[in-house]
Image (cartoon, rainbow, N blue to C red):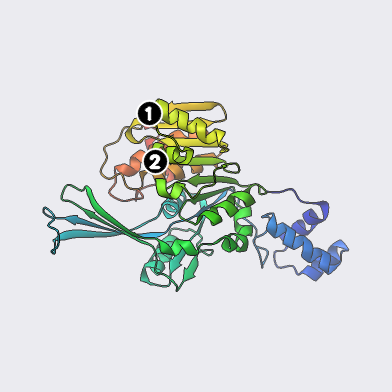
Amino acid sequence: MEDTSPQEAAVLAAIRDNPFVGQQEIASLLGLARSTVAAHIVQLMQKGHILGRGYLLPTPARAVCLGGAVLDRKYRARQTLVPETSNPVDGIRSLGGVARNVAENLARLGTATTFVSIVGDDEAGRTLLSFMRERGIDVSQVLVSAERPTAEYAAVLDPAGDLVMGLADMSIFDLLLPDHIDRIWPHLAAASWVFSDCNPPAETLAALIAKASTAQFRLAIDAVSTVKAARLPKDLTGIDLLLMNLDEANAILDRRTGRTMADAKDAALGLQQAGAREAIVTMGADGIVVAGTDGPKIFPAVAATSVDMTGAGDAMIAGTLHRLMADDDLYSAARVGALIGALTTESPASVHPELSQTFLDANLHRILA
């Protein structure tokens, strides 16, 4: 967080001593005008030292996840699909969205987490919010809109589980505009890390990146897809950690390459040269490239008996952020993130239902070896 002036520090100390203290009481205590105290409180909110009315103080080591919250539906055909007629399927409903998955993973690992998104005023939106509240995630800054329905993704799979068709209604995220970033700024400014996916509009991402340059939190962004990666500005300055696969990196850097780890290493360096302070480029089963302050390093994928790859990348992001908030360097944090991603593939769920710090500790030997 930004440093405070002597008077701001005195006001903050008075609030810490008594969170219910009034502005006139602070003014009398410190020998200041009430208007001066009010101005200092506004500055303390902007700097993230207090969270608004009631003088709520921020939780240490808190993450904010901003972006997609989606109701996922999967329909797996029981037999060969026949077009233009009804097909028997087995249907599964689950909760998804990159930022939502990252938030749930972080909360399961014990990290204090706030989720920022937009949902419809409908059953799906209420289900999403209720589920996340039950897991201890702060959803007080999620917008509820009657203009459009909660985002939904429907996947039609063949009997082998391969995707035949995906249908996505994500238009509600067009309503997540820069003014919402302004309204919730004290919650962002008070965080240790802010993570965003690229579901919000380009102007919202640009506003977040620009404002982050004046804040003390560190900013991580995930591209989500090659199409949504285009929402990022060409100048990536202001992004502390950028995460994406090789295709997404090539789309941002406007280049074509092969599919080797050397190509991924070049892409990670290219993202740093474009302004990102650090970058991770993922290559699925081949591993990851971590470009930190000591240059790019290649790490192999963690061996896993995979059941479903859905959510593995989101789990990797959450694991990396979780360890960065514990003061690991990026290389060590990314290795733990890769482990959590691998563990997630061993579950049919997008977020491993057994994930916890204890579960992680019990599996650390898989990377320590």
Q: Whole-percent x and y of residue 77?
A: 16, 55
> Could you tell me how far apart the alpha carbons at marks 2 and 1 are, in whole angstroms?
14 Å
Residue 300, numbered label: 1
Find residue 342 and report its image quarter: top left
Q: Does residue 315 show up? A: yes
| Residue 239, placed above or below residue 78 | above
Residue lying at 80% horizontally and 69% vertically, measured from the top left: 25
Q: Secondary structure at mark 2?
A: helix
| Residue 60, placed above or below residue 331 | below
- Residue contact at pointers 2 and 1, CB within 8 angstroms: no
Q: Identify the mark nearer the N-term, 2 or 1.
A: 1
The residue where tag 2 is placed is 340
Which of labels 2 and 1 is toward the front? 1
Q: Locate the C terminus and report the quarter of the image it occupies.
A: top left
In the visual, does 217 lie left or right of 84? Answer: right
Q: Whole-percent x and y of residue 89?
A: 16, 59
Residue lying at 62% horizontally and 58% vertically, measured from the top left: 185
Report the front residue among 78 and 359. Answer: 78
Q: Whole-percent x and y of residue 219?
A: 56, 46
Q: Does residue 299 show up? A: no
| Residue 49, placed above or below residue 319 | below
Residue 135, numbered label: none
**Three-letter amino acid code of the residue under disc 2:** Ile
In the visual, does 192 lie left or right of 128? Answer: right
Q: Secondary structure at mark 1?
A: loop
